[in-house]
């Protein structure tokens, strides 16, 4: 099986924490740099440049900084030659080596578009991890629908505008078949409550300060 791990970053985030988290990943990712013109799309640039509606300090009504993440996933799925595209947030730290067999247990089955971390009924999904099955016939229709809700500006009709809420809204609206790998969702640490917790830790929000300088570089991709 071929896995392509992706994330997005900019120079400020790299300096703040990603230079300590990403080098410790076993499967070295394709980093979608925000400054890299090779994958840019003027339609997304126009969305980020618009003045209205105004963002607020609340996460609920922020969208610009999260659009890079969504755009990167769409670009990777449309262009990857892998069997699976795995999105990881740049503030995820790999804590232990993962074998190919262990990694495969975290992938979607042939019947599923993706694996993800659902937090229903408490809240929207945790999107620090999403593994997409590129062989499923509904994968590209799903990301097409995800792109459309942004570029049509219909995201502003939703209660919240950030990527996790929008992604989960599209998942449910399209009834896309996906596999939840967080069977007993609680608030707090979704990675730690799932099988991801044996190998990864998601340092969300203020927890980014816990990403240490001495993050170990783990053995590289064993299938490369």
Image: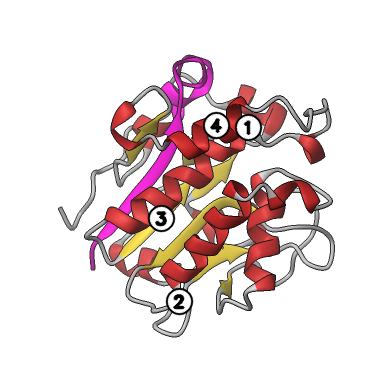
State the mark number for residue 46.
Answer: 4
Work out whether residue 176 can be spotted: yes
Calculate the distance from the C-alpha at mark 3 to the C-alpha at mark 1.
22 Å
Q: Identify the residue at horizontal 45%, vertical 85% (top origin).
A: 111
**Of callouts 2 and 1, which one flags the residue occurring earlier in the amino acid sequence?**
1
| x, y percent for residue 64 | 63, 32
Which residue is tagged 3? 86
Q: Which residue is mark 1?
A: 64
CA–CA distance in space, label 3 to label 4? 27 Å
Disc number at residue 138?
Answer: 2
Instruction: Judge by depth and name the residue closer to the eye, 92 or 44.
Output: 44
Contact (Cβ within 8 Å) of mark 4 with mark 2: no
The mark that comes first in sequence, 3 or 1, is: 1
The Cα–Cα distance between marks 1 and 4, rounded to whole angstroms, is 11 Å
Segment colored magenta: 1-21
Gap between marks 2 and 3 measured at Cα? 17 Å
Tag count: 4
Check if residue 13 falls in the magenta segment. yes
Q: Is residue 203 left or right of residue 122?
A: left
Q: Is 91 covered by the magenta stretch?
A: no
User: Residue at image x 31%, y 60%?
Assistant: 99
Which marked residue is nearer to the observer: mark 3 or mark 4?
A: 4
Q: Is residue 72 left or right of residue 80?
A: right
Quick check: marks 2 and 3 in contact, CB under 8 Å?
no
- Which is nearer the N-term, disc 2 or disc 3? 3
């Amino acid at each position: 099986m071929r896995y392509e791990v992706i994330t997005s970053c900019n120079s400020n985030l790299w300096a703040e924490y990603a230079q300590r988290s990403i080098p410790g990943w076993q499967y070295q990712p394709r980093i979608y740099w925000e400054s890299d013109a090779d994958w840019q799309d003027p339609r997304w640039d126009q969305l980020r440049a618009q003045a209205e509606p105004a963002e607020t300090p609340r996460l609920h009504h922020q969208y610009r900084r999260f659009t890079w993440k969504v755009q990167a996933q769409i670009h990777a799925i449309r262009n990857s030659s892998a069997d699976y595209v795995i999105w990881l947030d740049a503030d995820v730290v790999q804590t232990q080596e993962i074998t190919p067999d262990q990694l495969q247990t975290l992938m979607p089955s042939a019947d599923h578009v993706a694996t993800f971390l659902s937090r229903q009924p408490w809240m929207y999904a945790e999107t620090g991890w999403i593994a997409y099955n590129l062989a499923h016939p509904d994968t590209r229709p799903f990301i097409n629908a995800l792109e459309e809700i942004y570029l049509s500006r219909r995201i502003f009709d939703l209660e919240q505008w950030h990527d996790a809420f929008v992604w989960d809204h599209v998942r449910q609206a399209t009834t896309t078949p996906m596999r939840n790998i967080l069977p007993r969702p609680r608030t707090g640490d979704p990675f730690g409550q799932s099988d991801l917790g044996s190998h990864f830790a998601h340092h969300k929000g203020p927890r980014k300060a816990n990403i240490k300088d001495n993050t170990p570089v783990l053995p590289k991709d064993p299938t490369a």
